[in-house]
Image (cartoon, helix red, strand yellow):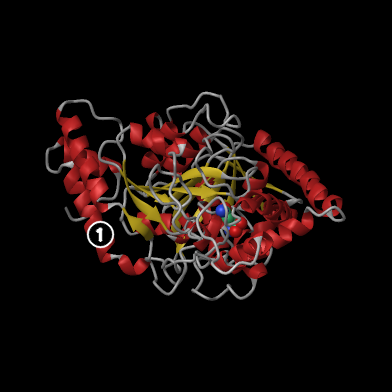
Amino acid sequence: MESIRSFSDIRQLIEGKNASCEDIVLFYLKKIEENRHLNAFLEVFSEESLQRARIIDQKIQQGKAGRLAGMVVGIKDVFCLKDHKIQAASKILEGFVSQFTATALQRLLDEDAIIIGRLNCDEFAMGSSNENSAYGPVLNAADNSRVPGGSSGGSAVAVQAGLCTVALGSDTGGSIRQPAAFCDVVGIKPTYSRVSRYGLLAYASSFDCVGVFSSNIEDNALVLEIMAGADEYDSTVSRSEVPAYSKNLLWNGPAKVAYVKELLDGDGVQEDIKQNLSSSLQMLKEAGHEVIPVSFPLLKYALPTYYILITAESSSNLSRYDGVKYGYRTRDAKGILDMYKKTRTQAFGEEVRRRIMLGTFVLSASYYDAFYTKAQKVRNLIRAEAIKILTEHDFLLMPVTPTTAFKLGEHNKNPLEMYLADLFTVQASVAGIPAISVPNGYDANNLPIGLQIIANYFEEEQLYQFANTYFSRS
Ligand code: GLN
C-alpha cells in the first residue's frame, strides 16, 4: 500500500481482499512512526488497535461488520474513552483515566471504527496554533516551520499527513475550521447541539461542538451522520432527525450565495486570501448561482463577544480542577487553600490561567452587567443578523482565516494577535450555526488556503452538497 487517502480507498482494498483491517492499521502505525517529528499524537494505541482490527476482520468474514469497518480514527485529547487517559494536553490531568466513553466516540465504535490514538491540541482547547500544549507544538506537514493552527492542530495534521483516515476535533470558536484551513483538509463545525457533548471535556459549554476532520467531504459526511442525533446522556442535543448526509452529496439548482463586501474591500486580510475568495465567487456566478454582497455590521463585535463569554464559561468549567478530584496535585501545600493555589498555578499553562482570571473578572459582581450581560445581548444581536442573512440566502461564504499558516513563535508573545486568528470563525460559533472549511488552493508560498461556507441551523446536508459539488478535489 503506497498511500490511503480516503475511506473508499480502504473499502476497495478490503472488498477486493487486497488488505485486511490489520494491514490497514499496520500501514497507519508505520506512517505515525515515520512522522513522529510532527508531534501530532500524544499516545498511540498500537496493540489495542491491532487487536481490534483482527476482531473486525473476523466480523467482515462473517458478514457482520459495521458501516465503519476499516476506518481508522484519531481523537483529539478532549474525548473520554473508557479506561484510557485524557488530558486536554494539560499537566493538570496527568494520570487521569476516563471512566466512560463519549457518545460521539461510542457511536463510531459501534460501527466498527478503530481508534488509533490521542491527538495533541492546545491546552484545554484554548489557542489557535497548538503552541499552548503542555506537550509541545504540532508541526504543519506542509512546512515544518509553521503552525498547524489550533486548537485541534494534532487532528488536522494527522489527516493532512495521512496518519489516520479521519480525526475528531472540537470547535468552540474555530478549532476545527482554522486548523483544517492551515492544513489543507476538510473540517466541519456542525450546528450547536447537533452532536452530543457527553464525554467531551468542557471548555465553553454554550459554544462547544464536536466535529470531524477528513481528506474529503464524503468521509466527513458519513462520520457526522453516525455521530449526530439525540442522546439520553445530553439533554441539550437536538432531537431533530439526522439526514443521511453521505447518501446524496450533489447540489442541484441555483443557490443564493452571500458574501460580506467589507471583507473583500478592507485591510487585515492577506491579499491571496481575498483573491481566492473573489475567484470562487466568480466561479459560482459562472455556474449560474446568484452571488450577492451583504453587509454584516456586527461582525467586528463577534471576536470581543466571543472572548468575554468563553473566558466566563471556561473559568467556571475549569474550577473543577482543584487537585482533589482529578489528576495532578502539588506536593508541598500547607493547607487546603494553599493546595488549590499551588496545584492550579503549577499545572495550568499561561494561556489557561489568563483566561480563568479574565473569566473570573467578567463574572465578578461589579463587572457582571458591564461585560457578561452585555456580551450576551450582543450575542443575540449577532445571531439575529446571521439568521437574517441565512434566511434570505442559502450560504454565506467567508475566508476561514485572515492569513495562511504563520510561523511557530510568530504570534505567541501577544495574546491579542493570536486571538485575531479567529476573526472569521467566531461568528458561526457565537450564532451556533454550522460552517465547513474546505481546501481551496494555495498562496504564493504554496501554503493551503481554506474557504468557509456557512449555512442556517441544521443545514449540514446543504453544506456538504454545495461543498462537494463545487469545492471538492476528488
Ligand atoms: N482559538 C479559539 C480559542 O482559543 C478557538 C478555540 C476552540 O475552538 N476550541 O478560544
Q: Position of residue 135 (x, y in %)?
A: 44, 66
Q: Which residue is mark 1?
A: 31
Location of residue 189 with respect to 408 vertically, above or below: above
Residue at the limit of the structure toward the left, as seen here: 17
Q: Is residue 214 shown above or below 68?
A: below
The amino acid beneath tag 1 is Lys
Mark 1: few, some, or many residues within 10 Å (few <14, many ≥20)? some
Image position, residue 406 (x, y; %): 51, 70
Image-based side of 254 in relation to 379, left or right: left
Look at the image and tell me whether residue 139 can be seen.
yes
Numbered marks: total: 1
Disc 1 element: helix
Residue at left 24%, top 41%? 52
Q: Is mark 1 within 8 Å of ligand 1?
A: no
Instruction: Please state which of residues 409 and 396 is positioned toward the viewer in this rendering.
Output: 409
Residue lying at the far front in this picture: please name it: 335
Residue at 12% in and 42% down: 18
Q: In this rendering, would 182 be left or right of 174?
A: left
Residue at horizontal 16 percent and vertical 33 percent from the top: 58
Residue drawn 62% across the image and 53% down it: 318
Left or right side of 131 for 53: left
Q: Which corner quadrant of the figure contains ligand 1? A: bottom right
Residue 399 seen by the camera:
no
Side (left or right) of 418 relative to 195 = right
The picture places residue 351, in percent across and down from the top left corner, at 61, 66
